[in-house]
Amino acid sequence: MTDTPLSPGTRIRDAIIERAQRMPQFDHETVVGLSIATAGPDPESLENDIQRKTDLMLRVLLTDPTFVTFNPRLHLFDGIDSIERQRIFPKDGETFFAEERVAITFLAYSSFEPRIDDDYERTVLTVPIPKADPLKVVIDLSA
């Protein structure tokens, strides 16, 4: 029986879970918007041209090791949550123009050591009781 290599998504998820169990962290979500525009002689050629240019841009960007590295000391982000596309075709005219807007949602996590100025050692809880002495409970955590 051979071991099946873990997918990049599984490795990333496991690393995130491991990091989350170590110390408090902030979760960051950043949306980066990109716009690709093209002009052409007819709407059909625009459709193919804009899709080809958008696919090329995403392929180059998301396969660039300097951009997508998951090295903890060098990373820009921990994962991509979503990629949304929106195509815009203006009204008919002499020159046809198309734009595709791409929104990439990046996830990042920053961990920090908690700062504790004083240790929580005890609580005194006082409950007023009408026509009787108040009930006083001391919770001591220092022991």
Image (cartoon, grey):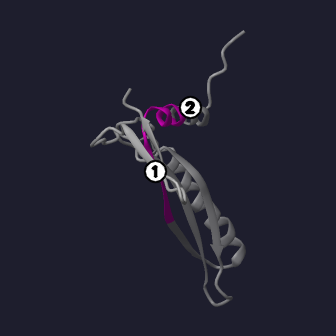
Q: Is residue 30 magenta?
A: yes
Classify residue 44 by image quadrant: bottom right
In-front residue for pair 118/110: 118
Residue furthest to the left in view is: 117
- The correct choice, above or below, for 53 with respect to 76 in the image is below
- The correct choice, above or below, for 74 with respect to 1 in the image is below
In-front residue for pair 94/109: 109
Q: Amino acid at mark 1?
A: Thr
**Percent from the top left, x then y, of residue 32?**
48, 62
Classify residue 83 by image quadrant: bottom right
Residue furthest to the bottom in view is: 93
**Percent from the top left, x then y, of residue 46?**
65, 72
- Quarter of the image with the C terminus in it: top left
**Percent from the top left, x then y, of residue 66?**
40, 43
Mark sitting earlier along the chain (2/1): 2
Residue under circle 1?
126
Question: Residue placed at 49% from the left, 33% from the top?
Answer: 21
Q: Which class describes the residues within 10 Å of circle 1: few (<14), some (14-19), or many (20+)?
A: few
Would residue 136 appear left or right of 85 to someone viewing this image? Answer: left
In-front residue for pair 17/91: 17
Magenta stretch, residue numbers: 16-33
The number of numbered discs placed on residues in the rendered structure image is 2
